[in-house]
Image (spheres, helix red, strand yellow):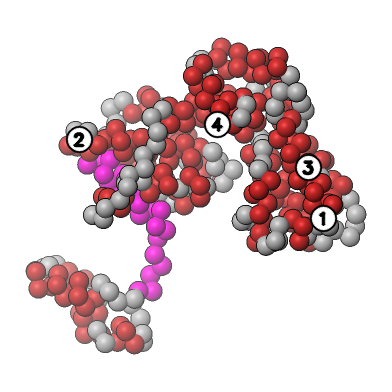
Amino acid sequence: MNLDNFIVRGKRRAVEKYKDAGAWNDLTDEVRDELLIDVAPLPSQVKGEPEEAKRFDLLIFNLQLALLKGSKSFDRLKKQLLEIASALDEQTAIPIIAAQHPLILDILSDAWWEGITVPVLELVRLRLRGLVQHIEKGKRKIVYTDFEDELGASAEIDLPEVGEVDFSRFKSKARHFLREHEDHIVIAKLRHGKPLTATDIEELQTMLLSAGIGDQKHYEKATQVASGLGAFVRSLVGLDRSAVAEAFSDFIADTGATADQIEFLDMVIEHLTEKGVMDPALLYESPFIDIAPEGPQQVFEIERAKKLVQVIREFNESAAVG
C-alpha cells in the first residue's frame, strides 16, 4: 500500500502496524476487526489476478471438498471441470494452453478420473488457473456457473445440458484422430475448401466409427449443431492457410492495399484457418470492429466488401454436400 495515497494516509498507523510480520502471529477478534474495518478496504498497488483464475480456484476447492466428503455435488462439479477442459482443448493455438495439452487430454479421459485424489486436483488448479481467461468469451459461462451461489448470493444455475460433457469428449477424440489423418483424401478436400459429395460424408463417418469414436447419436448431434457433418469436421480440422490466403489473394494483389486492409484480411484468414468456417456476421464484431467499427465496407469499397463475404460463404458451403 502506498502511504502517499491520501486514502491510505488516513489509516497509516494500522498499515504500518501490519507491515510487521509479527503482528499476524496472534489474530485475536480485536485484530481481525481492525484488519477488516481499517485495512482491507484500502487501495493496494498489488496487481490483482484475473477474476477467471479466482473462480477456477473456487471450482477446484469445491471439487476437492466434495471428493473428501463424498458429496453428491462431486459429479456436478466434475462436469464443470470437463467443460472447461473441453473449451481449453479447442484453444491449443495459444502456446501456454498447448504446453498443458497433455494434462487437458488426461482430464477428458475416463481413466484419469479413476482413483482421483486431492493432490492431483491441486495440480490441475495450479496448472490451469492461468489459462481459463483465454477461453472464448461465448464459452466463459461454463467457468462462472454456480459460483455466485457458492459465494452466498442467489443465482440461477446454468449447468450444461445432459450429454454435453459426453459430446465434448467425442469432439476431442474426433479432433485428434482427424488431425492425425489429415492426408486422407476427404479430410484433405475439407482442409482445402473443395466441395464434398454424399459419398465423402459417408466415408468420414465410417472412418470415425471404425476408429471407435462416438456412435450414431453423436453424429446426429454433430450434424445438427454444425448444420452438417462436413461442417462439423471442418470446424475440428480447420482450413489450410495457403488455400485460404490464395482465395483472398486478389484483395491485396494491388500494391495500393492499406495497412488496415491487410490487417483485416489477415484476421479473416486466421479465423478461417483455425475454425474452418465463419459466420459473416462476425465481421461486425470484435476484433474486426477494432479496425473497422462500421464493418468491412469501412476498409474496402462496397463491391470488394461484398466479394469478401462471398468468399467466406463459399468456404462455408464447400463443407456441405454438393
Q: Residue at x 21, y 85 (%)?
A: 13
* Mark before the other along the chain sequence, 3 or 4: 4
Q: Which residue is mark 2?
A: 71
Name the side, left or right, on which 236 lies relative to 38: right
Circle number at residue 225: 4
Q: Residue 186, how many percent across, how many down?
A: 71, 21
Using the numbered discs, state the Cα–Cα distance from disc 3 to disc 2 in whole angstroms. 54 Å
Q: Which of the pair 260/295 is nearer the observer?
A: 295
- Residue at image x 53%, y 21%? 220
Q: Amino acid at mark 2?
A: Ser
Give the residue pinned by disc 3: 310
The dot on residue 302 is 1
First of labels 1, 2 by sequence position: 2
Instruction: Measure how far apart labels 4 and 1 are at the Cα level.
Output: 32 Å
Query: How far apart are the alpha carbons under marks 2 and 4?
Result: 34 Å
Q: Quadrant of the N terminus?
A: bottom left
Residue 79 x, y percent position in the rendering: 36, 35
Query: Which mark is nearer the camera, 2 or 4?
Result: 4
**Label 3 crowd bin: few (<14), some (14–19), many (20+), radius 10 Å:** few
Q: Check residue 46 for magenta coloring.
A: yes
What secondary structure is the stretch in magenta mostly built from? helix
Image quadrant of residue 159?
A: top left
Q: Is residue 216 visible?
A: yes
> In the image, which disc is placed on residue 202?
none
> Spatial distance from mark 3 to mark 1, Cα to Cα?
12 Å
**What count of labels does the image hold?**
4
Q: Is residue 258 left or right of residue 108?
A: right
